[in-house]
Image: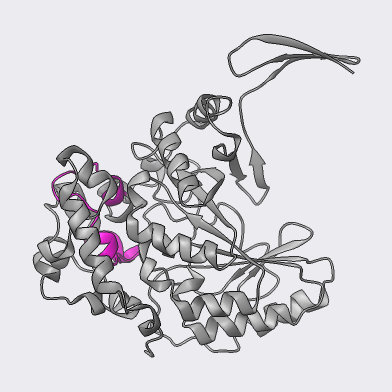
């Protein structure tokens, strides 16, 4: 691969050393919450120099893929060993070295570990689970394109991600493919968008589009921006969290060239917001890219109001606006991640009025069968008559509004 990251490496030694220094200065109870382990302390990476560590291509090439590698990082449980044995038949394992430094080796309940390491429960299909719960394949008029809402489309630019989340709703599609994709594979999608003048908004997702090389990503932007009726261009990604090294100066130049571009970043837990992640998000914000977050509600990971509140406060600190909380989709093999809907409603109940409005996202269920996102929340309208509404506020006090 060509290396486009050299333009951001001049200060990487200082960055890496500063992170390690500050990590060692934190009290032990907070160290694992806010800073990754110094990678030099991990046997697998002890000989890696800072320039390699900050090269996103090196990070991808050296992802943790096999049980033998994971065993050098964590003390595997029986459930994890069983999950790893079966994982290739469902969704392959891949964890970037950077992301791996945040996994607690001795705690199976570590929120990063639970998202990345397969367990036996993943292979027990729950009731009502589906291969394609959002019916994206049904609403695909062209390869790589999903058209559900009248004025916007979803463009699936790649099947690959930097790290594979075990709760992935597109596990039927994503993974490591051996074939080399054709540069023209999205031509039919571009033609469809071009022919439908109602489409004003294109969301580029995958997989993760930031896994593409700069040239390939620019080619997609160029094709979409050549369509006059497209007004709004978005990217859905988890890379600023799992592979912040990918945010390079050259990439930012491409974003600026084809902007305005908005970005939705997948964050699930406050532990994911490290100094290195913050730096990547600040680079994006400084380049004029508005940032929002998308969070999946996951059992025993972020299903407590205080965890979500901490996540959303920390996101605002790095200029990421909390946008959506998703009820975990009923995709096959994810039953152990799902919570009752009441858990999500309670989280919104504990946020609304108790923190800044900017820190309160919309809780949605992506309706099974392709119904789209449906907002769910506490009921603040107690009764309604002609010209009269009886309302409750966040404290439970009752008020009347007369039209």
State the residue at coordinates (17%, 48%).
Answer: 25
Total numbered badges shown on the rendered structure:
0
Quadrant, the C terminus? top right
> Where 186 sits versus 357, above or below?
below
* Residue sticking out furthest to the left: 43
> Where 139 sits versus 78, above or below?
below
Question: Residues in magenta?
Answer: 85-114
Instruction: Say if the magenta span includes residue 173.
Output: no
Q: Is residue 22 visible?
A: yes
**Foreground: 335 or 195?**
195
**Foreground: 395 or 179?**
395
Instruction: Say if the magenta span includes residue 93.
Output: yes
State the residue at coordinates (28%, 66%).
Answer: 15
**Foreground: 379 or 353?**
353
Report x, y in % for residue 1.
37, 89
State the residue at coordinates (61%, 56%).
Answer: 135
**Foreground: 370 or 302?**
302
Would you identify the image quadrant in which residue 223 lies?
A: bottom right
Q: Is residue 108 visible?
A: no
Report x, y in % for residue 184.
60, 89
> Where 221 sits versus 116, above or below?
below
> Where 326 sits versus 309, above or below?
below
């Amino acid at each position: 691969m060509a290396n486009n990251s050299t333009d951001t490496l001049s200060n990487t030694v200082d960055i890496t050393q500063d992170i390690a220094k500050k990590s060692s200065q934190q009290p032990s109870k907070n160290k694992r919450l806010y800073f990754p382990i110094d990678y030099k302390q991990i046997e697998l990476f002890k000989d890696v120099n800072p320039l390699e560590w900050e090269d996103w291509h090196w990070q991808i090439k050296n992802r943790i893929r096999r049980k033998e590698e994971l065993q050098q990082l964590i003390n595997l449980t029986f459930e994890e060993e069983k999950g790893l044995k079966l994982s290739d038949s469902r969704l392959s394992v891949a964890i970037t070295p950077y992301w791996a430094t945040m996994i607690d080796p001795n705690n199976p309940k570590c929120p990063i570990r639970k998202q990345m390491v397969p367990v036996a429960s993943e292979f027990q299909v729950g009731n009502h689970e589906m291969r394609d719960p959002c019916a994206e394949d049904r609403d695909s008029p062209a390869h790589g394109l999903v058209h559900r809402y009248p004025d916007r489309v979803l463009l699936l630019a790649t099947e690959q991600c930097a790290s594979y989340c075990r709760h992935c709703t597109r596990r039927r599609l994503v993974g490591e493919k051996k074939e080399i994709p054709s540069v023209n594979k999205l031509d039919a999608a571009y033609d469809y968008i071009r022919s439908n003048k109602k489409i004003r908004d294109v969301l580029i997702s995958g997989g993760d589009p930031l896994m593409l090389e700069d040239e390939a990503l620019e080619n997609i932007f160029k094709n979409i921006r050549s369509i006059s009726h497209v007004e709004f261009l978005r990217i859905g990604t988890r890379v600023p969290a799992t592979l912040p090294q990918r945010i390079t100066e050259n990439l930012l130049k491409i974003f600026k060239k084809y902007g305005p571009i908005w970005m939705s970043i997948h964050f699930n837990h406050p532990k994911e917001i490290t100094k290195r992640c913050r730096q990547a998000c600040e680079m994006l914000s400084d380049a004029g890219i508005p940032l929002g977050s998308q969070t999946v509600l996951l059992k025993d990971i972020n299903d407590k109001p205080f965890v979500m509140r901490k996540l959303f406060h920390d996101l605002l600190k790095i200029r990421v606006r909390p946008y959506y909380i998703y009820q975990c989709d009923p995709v096959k093999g994810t039953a152990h991640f799902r919570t009752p809907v009441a858990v999500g409603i309670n989280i919104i109940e504990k946020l609304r009025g108790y923190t800044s409005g900017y820190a309160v996202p919309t809780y949605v269920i992506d309706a099974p069968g392709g119904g789209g996102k449906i907002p769910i929340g506490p009921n603040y309208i107690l009764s309604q008559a002609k010209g009269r509404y009886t309302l409750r506020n966040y404290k439970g006090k009752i008020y009347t509004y007369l039209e």
